[in-house]
Image (cartoon, helix red, strand yellow):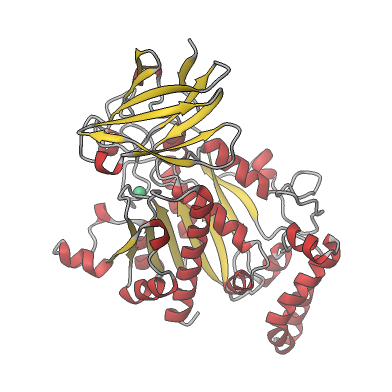
Amino acid sequence: MKIDIITGFDGSCPHFPQGVEKRGENSFWVRPGYRAKPGNSEEAPGCGSRLSLQINNGASSALPIELIVDWESDKRTLHHDLGYMRHAGADEWKMIPGMHDGQIVVHDLEIAPGITHFGLYPEYNYEECKKFVTSLAIDQDGFCRARACAMPSYGRVSCKSLFGTHPGLRPPLHGRGTQEITGQAVMIPSLEGYAKRGVGPQSAGKDFCKQLGHIFGRRAASGGPTKEKNYAKILNLPAGHGCNVRVIGQSRERRDLWQITLPSPNPKARTFFIQARDHAYETAGSYCVEGIVDFLRSENEIAIYLRSKFNVYIVPMTNPDGVFNGMSRLTWEQGADLNRVQTIPDPAHDALKRAIDTVKPAVHMNIHNWTDKFTDGLLANEGKIAERIMAFMQPDSAHYKRWMVETQEDWLKANKFTTVPEKSKSWKDYAKEQFNAVGVIFEFPWFGLNTAAMRAKGTRAFLALALAAIAERGL
Ligand SMILES: [Zn+2]
């Protein structure tokens, strides 16, 4: 057989060979809704939006293949008339059309020799997230493992939690205590930055510290001897990584939930909490997170400004079981909905709630991607914040999108409630109720974007929300 469809890998959907059937020479019938057990919510037949396969062409030249994708309902196929493809040797995903007719979408593909990834959206699965957070950590020898970075570690940053015993289920605390911040505030410019200026990492680090000194210099000078000492200590730290990663808990199937922390050198910085991948298929959130982390570790002047305002905490994949097992929304076929404060018991949900309760966010950002091709969603606790965000982030007409905005007030009116009922509460509602947080959910559908564009969009959204919160709340 020259063409094989591969299932069963991390994130594949259908996750089992029973979801694929050979119908003819290089023609395959695919049922993404195939589940090992009967499913609830979007795991029920015809309700999901996950599709992720690998196609192996064992021949020495390209071959045409036909994928007949049966979504078992026409409820969403209007938005499922596309796919994304990436040959194992290529860096970027390419969007391709599919022809829909009722519940069926047909993809006619030209498959090069070797492995080609194919899905409704670009993949981003558990192992990829692990690779990303590992790249941010520092190994046991004290060297940064970040991409292209060879800086020795001088701070108390450790990634033992990633490679060995993790600190139980206690989320990391990089609170407002100056002492703790002193040990953690280790920021460096990117290596590209050094290359451009033609200076070595050590002096580049000092350069960057000078910039921070510029921001905090006046306050340090007027802040009394203790503060001055601490600031001096921060500013003299020769190197660091600008972030650290801890395991904050494990899922039902014992996969890790990570938290990336980007500490601020400002002891009075507020807390900014970001979560992604509550819903397993919504891979946009993962690319947005990568964009945000890269931005915050860069020398961009707004990034440096925002790091002077916020300690940023990111849980990049709240639902690792759902992601791994090819679910659409839940943790397993009848599992928890990580986007709900109240759901069925699940250790991943417990870990997420504990992280939010520990961080006590002043700003809460939750990144999703619904399937509506032409509409970006902004679900906000407050209308004023939504208005600011839209002013800072114009409709993404380059990718054929308009904004759909819904405030909590709109939602209450439309549903004739005075308060959000427990069963409908998402984390932005919880963060508002518990911590008076500025809270927002973004929905960024893939249509027309590649992963580079999605990274940039996530960065833009973070920036717009952070500046909106600063402006509205006087942070
Ligand atoms: Zn979602």
Q: Who is closer to the viewer here, 291 or 410? A: 291
Q: Most extreme residue toward the bottom, as rendered?
A: 222
Q: Who is closer to the viewer here, 344 or 130? A: 130
Q: Is residue 188 toward the left or the right of residue 322 in the image?
A: right
Q: Most extreme residue toward the top, as rendered?
A: 1
Residue 149: in sight, yes or no?
yes
**Residue drawn at point x = 48 percent, y = 53 percent:** 454
Q: Is residue 29 toward the left or the right of residue 292 in the image?
A: left
Q: Position of residue 73 (x, y in %)?
A: 21, 33
Quadrant in which residue 410 is drawn? bottom left
Q: Position of residue 246 (x, y in %)?
A: 61, 49
Q: Is residue 134 toward the left or the right of residue 387 in the image?
A: right
Q: Is residue 219 above or below residue 168?
A: below
Total marks shown come to 0
Q: Most extreme residue toward the left, as rendered?
A: 416
Q: Who is closer to the viewer here, 217 or 406? A: 406
Residue 362: in sight, yes or no?
no
Quadrant in which residue 335 is drawn? top left
Q: Position of residue 267 (x, y in %)?
A: 63, 74
Q: Is residue 267 above or below residue 368?
A: below
**Residue drawn at point x = 41 percent, y = 50 percent:** 448
